Image (tube, rainbow, N blue to C red):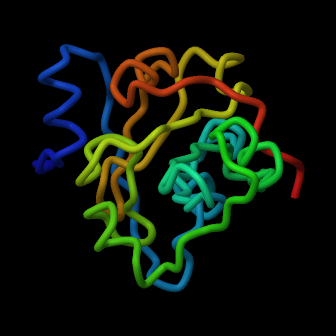
């Protein structure tokens, strides 16, 4: 039986549909492209959660396809900053409540401004971390916007 995470409980609370998918965890390969491989999904449908800090607005969250990189310049502009940088991985749990390889944009300690790459609109569903390693949530991207009070933005570039 799969134990529901905080992200799942929040989706249940908001009555948003989702499906959980378990996969084997490889501590050496926690990246989203590896998750795509383990789940048999197109890497463009697996969304990784990235947390940044901006020079004006503080923390902001980006959800982008596994096979892309965050466009820091575009993300700074859309999030109301002149400059953003990735937070240090050692600060991730303190800031979000989640660990590397299990960070979900849903259910962080605080609600940070969240931006989902607009490429998500091309799919009926996308996959995001359920808030723990080895567990993904498959859901409609519009529902992810509702759950995070996020917005779509053009924030990724090819790797």
Give me the residue at 69% from left, 46% from top.
43
Q: List x then y, in percent, for residue 75.
A: 72, 45
Give me the residue at 40% from left, 78% from top.
91
Q: Is residue 27 above or below residue 120?
A: below
Q: List x then y, in percent, for residue 79.
A: 63, 40
Horizontal placement of 11 versus 134: left or right?
Answer: left
Question: Total marks drawn?
Answer: 0
Residue 153's quadrant in the figure? top right
Residue 94's quadrant in the figure? bottom left
Give me the residue at 56% from left, 24% from top.
151
Q: List x then y, in percent, for residue 97.
A: 25, 63
- In this view, the residue in front, 31 or 154, is 154
Quadrant in which the C terminus is drawn? bottom right
Q: Is residue 53 above or below residue 40?
A: below
- In this view, the residue in front, 95 or 101, is 95
Q: Is residue 31 above or below residue 137?
A: below
Q: List x then y, in percent, for residue 67.
A: 76, 52
Give me the residue at 77% from left, 55% from top.
72
Q: Is residue 67 above or below residue 113?
A: below
């Amino acid at each position: 039986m799969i134990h529901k995470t905080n992200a799942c409980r929040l989706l249940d609370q908001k009555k948003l549909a989702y499906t959980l998918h378990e996969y084997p965890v490889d501590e050496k390969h926690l990246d989203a492209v590896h998750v795509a491989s383990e789940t048999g999904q197109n890497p463009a449908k697996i969304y990784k959660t990235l947390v940044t800090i901006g020079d004006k607005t503080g923390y902001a969250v980006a959800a982008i396809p596994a096979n892309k990189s965050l466009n820091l310049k575009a993300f700074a502009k859309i999030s109301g900053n002149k400059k953003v940088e990735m937070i240090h991985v050692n600060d991730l749990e303190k800031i979000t409540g989640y660990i590397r390889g299990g960070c979900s944009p849903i259910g962080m300690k605080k609600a940070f401004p969240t931006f989902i790459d607009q490429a998500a609109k091309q799919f009926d569903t996308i996959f995001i971390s359920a808030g723990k390693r080895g567990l993904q949530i498959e859901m409609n991207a519009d529902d992810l916007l509702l759950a995070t009070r996020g917005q779509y933005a053009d924030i990724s570039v090819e790797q």
